[in-house]
Amino acid sequence: MPRSFPGYGWHREGVMSRVDEMDQEMMGQREGLPEELLPAIRCVQCGKCSSGCPVAFDTAHTPRKVIRLLQRGWLEEAGRSPFLGFCAQCQACTVRCPRGVQVSEVLLALLRFARAKGWVRPDGFHRSFEEMIRQRGRINELRLGLISQAGRLPSHPLEDLLLLVKMLLRGKLP
Amino acid sequence: METPSSKTGLFFWDQGGRLGKALDLNWLLGKLSKTKGISCCSLLDDPWGPGGLSQVVEKVQKGELGRLLWVGRFSREQQGILKKKLAEEGFNPYLQEWCDLEEQGVCRDGLEQTVRNKKALLLIQMWLARVRLLEPLAPVEIPASDSLLVIGAGAAGLHAAVSLTNLGKEVHLVERQSGVGGKVASLHRFYPRLCDPRCGLEFSIQALSDSGRARFHTLSRVVSLEGGPGNFQVRLEKRPRFVDEARCNACGECARVCPVEVRVSAGSQPGGEPPGLLPAATRAIHPSLPMGFPVAYVVERQYCPPGCRECERACPSKAVELDQETREEDLLVGAILVTTGWDPYPLSKVEEFGYGLYPNVISNLQMEGLLGSPTETPKEVGFIQCVGSRDERHLSYCSTVCCSVSLKQALYLKQRRPDANCYVFYQDIRSTGFQEELYQKLKEMEGVTFIRGIPSTVRPEAGTGRLRLRVEDTLSGREVNLALDLLVLAGGMVPSQGSEELAQVLKLPRNSLGFFESHLQCHPEESQRTGIYVGGCSREPMGVAASIESAQHASLEALRFTGGTVIIDPKYPVVDKTKCDKCKRCMEECPFGSFYFDENEFPSPHLGRCRQCGNCVGICPLAAISLRNLTIKQMAAQIQAASTSFMDGKEPTVFAFLCQNDAYYAARDAVEAGLPVPPNVVFLKVPCAGYVNNALIADALALGIDGVLIGGCEDGQCHYVKGNQLVSKRSDDLSDKLQKMMMERDRVRFVNLEIRDSEKYTATVEQFVQDLRAMGPNPFKM
C-alpha cells in the first residue's frame, strides 16, 4: 500500500464522494498549463513510465498519475504531489514513453513551478544547501551538516562520535 | 472530324416563367439575335412536353444548326436527355453547351433590373464565345487485354484471382517465394470462426487449378513495366526452381538423399526465426514454402555441396534439373493488382523486452507456431500489446489485428492447458466488430487477467530462466510483480520487404509509412497509377477477412481495363506541339504519371492512365496543353467576352474559377440558399483547381477584371491528389509577379472550399469585393 505523507498537504486518494458537485469547470483547462508542462496532454496513460520507475509505488503517486492530474488541469494537486520529491531524474520514463512525453523533464518543470507558487517548501536542509550554493558556488559539507542538524539531538550519539574520530583519522575533515 | 458550321442555335427555357420573372427576356432575345453567328434565337415553352423540341430537331435535321447553346437551368439528367435526343438526329453531343443563369445569381432578390439584364447578357455572350470554339468529339477506344496480373499470391491475391477466373479472366499470379499462401499459411487459426486458414487457401488453390485460367509465377518478381491500362507490358524475372514443375510429383525421394539441412527463413526475415507454423528446418531440396503449391520441390542451390547431384540421381521421374538458369518472361495484361501484404515489424528494435535475447520472449507470429506444434504448453504466459505500434519511436499507427490475435491465442492456450494463467498487458483493447464477443468471453474466463498497463522492461530470473516483470495496473494504481514462463509480444505490421522495389518498378507512390497510397475513403483500392489497384495489407494494416474483401474490391475495379476495349471519354489532354518546348513540367506534376515521350520526344499523355483532371493544363508554362472538351482557347475566349463591365462602372468585378467537385457546389448552393452573394462575381467551372493556368489569370487581369478568385478543395481532400496545392503555390508565384507590375498581389486569391461551404464562399466573395473597392479599379481597366 502506498504510504501517506501528512507533511505534504492534501491529496484525496480515490475519493469519489462529491456526488452533488459538477466537475465541468475543472476539466480541460489546458490554457492554464505552463508551456513546459504541455507535453503532458500527449500522454495515453499506458503506464510504461510507472512500470519502469525505480521510486514509484513507494509514494502515493506514480509519474503516470501526476501526468494525469496535469491533463485534467489540476495543477495544484499535481504540484503538491509527494512523488515530485522522490523523482530521481533517472530518465527511465522519458526513454520508454511511446508518445514522446518528456516525463522527467515535465516533472522537473512541475517541481520548479510548484516551488515558485509556494506549494512546495524546501525543508531546512534544502534551504541551507541552496543558500550555500548561491553564496559560494560550492558546498561546505561540515557546515551543511551542522546547520541542517542544528537544534536536533543526534539520534545515534555514540556511532556518530566514532564516525567523527574515523573521519578525523582519515583526514576527511578540515 | 470536319469542323461543323458556325451557325449557332440559342434556345431559352424560361423554366415556367421563372427566368422571365427576373429578366427582361424580350430585351435579351432582341440583343442576342443580332449577334454575329446566331442563326436562330428563340424561347422554348416546354421542352419536355410532346413536340416541345420539334423546332430544334427540325432545324438540326435540316442542317441549319452547327452548334447549340441552351440557356436555363437544365439538370444533369435533362442535359443527358437532350444529348441523346439530338444524337439520334446525328448531332454531335459535344457541340452544345448549357448556360445556367440562375446559379450565377441573376435571379436573386434585391438586384437592380439593369444589373440583372446586363449580367445575364454577359454570361450568355461568354458561353457563346465558348460555343463558337466547340469541336465535335467522339469517345476513343483503346485495346485491352483480357488477362490480369496479381502481384503477391497470399490470401488476398489468391481469393481475388479466384473471383477473376470465375469471371472468365486469365490471371497471372506472381510470387516471390517458392510457394503460394503468404503469411496466412503460417497461422495456426484465424478469427472470427477460429478455423485453420489452410482450408480456405487450399480451396482457392484448387479452384484456380481447376479453372485452367490461372498461371503461377513463383520465385519471380516484376522487373519492368511499360504501357498503360488495357495493355501493360510486364517483364518478370524468374529464378530457377531447379525442378521441372511438369515432371515432379512431390514423392520426396530427393529429400531423403539430400545431405544438407537448411534453416527456413520463409523469405520474409532472412536469418530470423521461422514465422508461424512453418518447419524450422528442411533439406536443401524441399517442398514449396509456405504452402506445398506449386507441387514441385525446390532446390536451395546456394546450400548444395559442390558437385553434389544426389537428388538428380534419386529422382524417379527425372524432374531435377540442377542446371536451370534465371530467365525472363514478358506478359501482356490489362490491369494489375498489388497484394504484396505485410511483414512483422522487427521486434528486436523494441529493445526493452529483450526479443532475440531471451529464448522465452517470442513474437505473436511465433506463438502461432507454438500453438500449432505439439510442444509442451507453458503455464504462466504474458501478452504485451502494442509492442512497437502506436509508438512514435517505432510505428505511429495501430495494426488493427494484434489485439484480436492475442485474444485468440490466449483462448487456444487455455484450451490446450486449462490451468495456464494468461496476463494481457494492454493500453486499449481494440477488438472491433464481432471480436468483442471473444474479448468478453476471455474476460470472464478464469486464469485470464487483463492488466491495463505496459511493462517498462523485462528481466530474466537468475537460475530458472523465467521472466520477471513489474507493471503498474493503471486502473487501480497498484504495482503488479509477475514471474512468467513465456512472454508473447504483439508486434505490428509493416509493408512487405519487396514493396519498396515494386514501388520503384511500378512507379507507385507510397505514403510516409511505406504503404501504397490511395484515396482511402472514396476509392480505397485505386492507387495513384490508373490500372494498378492495391488491396490488402499493402495498402493499410487489416485482418485476413478485410484484406480478402479489399483485394476482391480491387479486382472488381480492375475489370474496367480488361475485356477487349476500354472506352475513353474525349476529355483527355492534348499537347500543342507547335508551342511545347519539352520542359517536362507536365510529366513531373501529373499526379497519375500519365505522360510519356512520343516518337518525337514530346510529352504525350497515355489516354488510359489519364484521369482528365487538367492539372497538366494548369502547370504548362506555355499554356500548350488543353483538355479536348475544355481547351485553353475556349477558356480564354470566355474570359475575353467577360471583360465588358456589367456592374456600375465603379463597382469591382470578380472572376472565379471553381473546382467542379467541391467549390462549384458551394457557390451554387449559396445562391440557392438565398445567401447574399455579391452580384459582382462570375464563376467558371473547372475540373480541378489545378486546371487554372496562370496565363488565364493574367488574361483576366489584363482585360480589366478587378480580382480573380480560385476555389479549390481543402488540403488533403483533392480527388486528384494535390491540385489545390499546386494552384495555390502557382498563384503565390503569380502574386509576386503582380507586385512587380505594381499591381496589388491581393487581386488574385485562393480559397479552400468544401462542398457545403456556401457561407464561407459568400463571406469570401463579400470580403474580396470590399477589399477590391478599397484597392480601387484595376489599372488595366478601360
Image (tube, coloured by chain):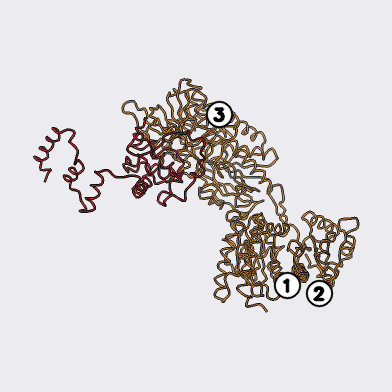
Q: Quadrant of residue B593?
A: bottom right
Colour of chain A as rendered: red
Q: Is residue A164 placed above or below B754 in the rendered structure?
A: above
Alpha-carbon span between mark 1 and mark 2:
20 Å
Have a look at marks 3 and 2 and say if they share a chain. yes
Report the quarter where the N terminus of chain B lies. Answer: bottom right
Q: How many dots with numbers?
A: 3
> Which structural element holds mark 3?
helix
Q: Earlier in the sequence, mark 1 or mark 3?
A: 3
Q: Label 3 amino acid? A: Leu
Q: Nearer the viewer, mark 1 or mark 2?
A: 1
**Drawn side of residue B360 relative to residue B44, left or right:** left
Percent across and percent down for residue B690 are 62, 61
Q: Which residue is mark 1?
A: B646
Q: Which residue is mark 2?
A: B36
The chain under label 3 reads B
Q: Which residue is mark 3?
A: B438
Percent across and percent down for residue B566 are 71, 52
Observer able to see residue B132? no
Q: Earlier in the sequence, mark 3 or mark 2?
A: 2
